[in-house]
Amino acid sequence: MSYSEHWNAIQKSEILDRAFERLREQTGIEAKLTAPAGSSTTGDSQVVFVQAERKVSYRVAYRAKVDRKAHLNQADEQLRRTAGPGLLVTAYMSTTLATHCREIGLSFLDAAGNAFLHGEGLFVWIAGRKPSTDMSGSRKGAGAFHGRGLQVVFALLAHPPLLHAPYRKVAQAAGASLGTTSKSLEDLMNRNFLVANDSGTRRWVDRQRVLQTWATNFPLGLRSHLQPRRYNAGNADWWREAQPETFDGYWSGEVAAAKLTHDLVPKLVTVYLPHDRGPFLAAHRLKADPRGPIEVLDVFWHFEQGGTEAPGVAPPLLVYADLLDLGDPRTDEQARLIHDRFLA
């Protein structure tokens, strides 16, 4: 596959993912792709929309760009020749073209959140939403050390088997889109942080440099976007018996260091939890307090833990970065110990 073909496949997958995500955000309707996207543009995959107990299936046609009614008429004619109702997915559909789709009965979704779906009790009509700047199709992006790119680099560093995994598996583990994953890996290679041989096997050129660059960029580039919130507890030692792993959560920062090195009394308790924090907060009677000594953030990775003997502890790279971010000599020393023991 040429680079152009590879990029087009990545871009297509990202647009499909974004279109389905926007539909779910706006309507609650879940989309499940039941066949691979493939390389052709019409009827090559199937999607099932799930709303309550109702399921509606469509054959999918993909167009990177639609800017005239003739394109819609052509897609509609091609989809009508396939079995079952058809669905056009594209990056952006103007209000004028969306209205034309409704007039000719062509169901569509776009990555901006516009949609027209009809059939078997399902009806959705959303028009007028503008495209986001990151879906322009440009190969230029924020890079590997910004936003979700940091999630990709974290997954590669914290879970070494991912370094040789397919892009889609890396994306799933990082909680990032396939497009972001591809751009991040490309950026790492352009910076000579990462190289790949002819068989596609990847290796770090200077892993320690990547690790330090990630830890430096993490606080502002990603951490601040993980919904950090502060809390207080009636009992200062509540964390000693708490088990965040039973809530799919992880200790980081000072508590993680205390459990890994047994050489620190935490002043700040840092825990990463799934988006639904309610069960953990209720179980431990944590109360919101902007100046509280307990900090809760969103889990942003999706791979199995490993490499530490303490249950419920975040990957050492994250513990290391959180300790450094505190800017305290006592936690700087703990960061050094974590680095030398787990990351060197």
Image: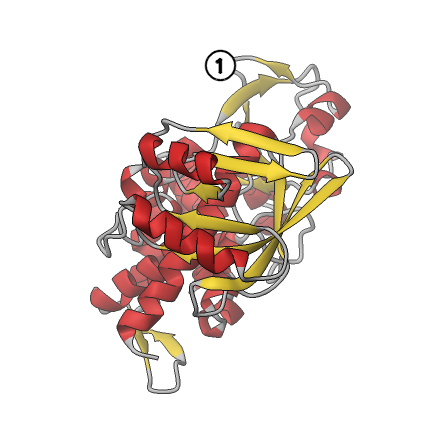
Q: Position of residue 292 (x, y in %)?
A: 54, 17
Task: Answer with left or right where residue 60 lies relative to residue 184.
Answer: right
Does any portion of residue 111 appear in the rendered image? Answer: yes
Name the residue at 66% across, 17% down: 233
Of the pair 51 and 256, the residue shown nearer to us: 51
Of the pair 66 and 263, the residue shown nearer to us: 66
Q: Mark 1 points at which residue?
A: 291
Task: Please tell me how crowded label 1 is: few (under 14), some (14-19), or many (20+) other residues with Cα within 10 Å.
Answer: few
Task: Answer with left or right where residue 184 lies relative to residue 271.
Answer: left
Name the residue at 52% across, 62% down: 43
| Quadrant position of the N terminus in the picture | bottom left
Does any portion of residue 334 appear in the rendered image? Answer: no
Identity, as a three-letter code, of the amino acid under mark 1: Arg
| Quadrant position of the C terminus in the picture | bottom left
Of the pair 55 and 215, the residue shown nearer to us: 55
Task: Answer with left or right where residue 322 lies relative to residue 232.
Answer: left
Label 1 sits on a secondary structure element that is loop
Q: Is residue 149 above or below residue 273?
A: below
Of the pair 165 and 139, the residue shown nearer to us: 139
Q: Position of residue 306 (x, y in %)?
A: 62, 61
Q: In this view, does 9 lie above or below 271?
A: below
Q: Where is residue 209 in the image (x, y as percent from the top left)?
A: 29, 61
Task: Answer with left or right where residue 45 lies relative to residue 196.
Answer: right
